[in-house]
Amino acid sequence: MIEIFDFLFAQYKEYPTHEIVLEVIAIIFGFLSVWYSKQNKIWVFPTGIISTLIFVYLLLKWGLLGDMMINIYYFIMSIYGWYIWTRKVDETHVTPISSTTLKEKYLSTIIFFATLIFVYLVYITFDKWNGWVAYVDALTTAIFFVGMWLMAKRKIENWIFWIVGDIISVPLYFYKGYTFTSFQYLGFTFIAIFGYLAWKRNLDRQALKS
């Protein structure tokens, strides 16, 4: 039992206590944000903003630039999404869940490849492009950038990107030595699957009413 605990959490012996506490708080708010997103509740954004701000601070200290950029982007898109989700499309209705249009699919592709290039340039600039982790960081950053953009626009396909990115992030963060965050992404994976199913049911109900 002790061996398993050491395998999972031994790296935290070298971390300052306040960083461990902040990571746990950020994870709790991260879970709340994803849960509210699954429930299609506006609280996804304020809880997400708290989580991302904490992670920006921690990731900057840990030197994980790609992950830090993801969270800065999450923060910006949370403000944008908060506006989109509360914007009235008529006198009584706010922006509904919908599927991506052909134009949005093209824009998603552009965001994906533009993010890959941007992350690569940042890593080269700071001399961080030094192993396979950098390649995976660039990939997950691009996946999450698209996912967050689609979630802010209340598009059901956002969940597909979250699921793929979360699955990749589970072993990635464990390898980096951040076990709590790795567990977070494992939880996110399951919530994202149920989130997709919940939004799909919502979309099907909308189709029956129209």
Image (tube, rainbow, N blue to C red):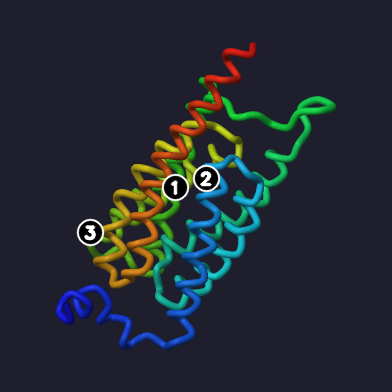
Residue type at mark 2: give it: Met
Drawn side of residue 88 relative to residue 152, left or right: right
Residue located 36% across and 50% down the image: 166
Q: Amino acid at mark 1?
A: Phe
Residue 109 seen in the figure:
no
Residue closest to the eye, 60 or 184:
184
The residue shown at (28%, 69%) is 176
Q: Which residue is mark 1?
A: 144
- Label disc, if present, on residue 132 of the rendered structure: 3
Say which residue label 2 marks: 148
Decide if residue 182 is on the left or right side of residue 32. Answer: left
Instruction: Tell me residue 31's x, y (percent).
Output: 49, 57
| Quadrant of the snapshot with the N terminus | bottom left
Residue nearest the viewer, comparing 113 with 187: 187
Residue type at mark 3: give it: Trp
- Mark nearest the camera among 1 and 3 is 1
Would you call the spot at circle 2 few (<14 residues within 10 Å), some (14-19), or many (20 or more)? Answer: many
- Circles 1 and 3, Cβ within 8 Å, touching? The answer is no
Q: Are marks 1 and 2 in contact (CB under 8 Å)?
A: yes
Query: Mark 2 or mark 3, which is nearer the start of the sequence?
Result: 3
Q: CA distance from mark 1 to mark 3?
A: 18 Å
Location of the C terminus (image quadrant): top right
Percent across and percent down for residue 140 are 36, 50
Disc assigned to residue 108: none
Q: Is there a contact, CB below 8 Å, between mark 3 and mark 2?
A: no
Give SS at disc 2.
helix
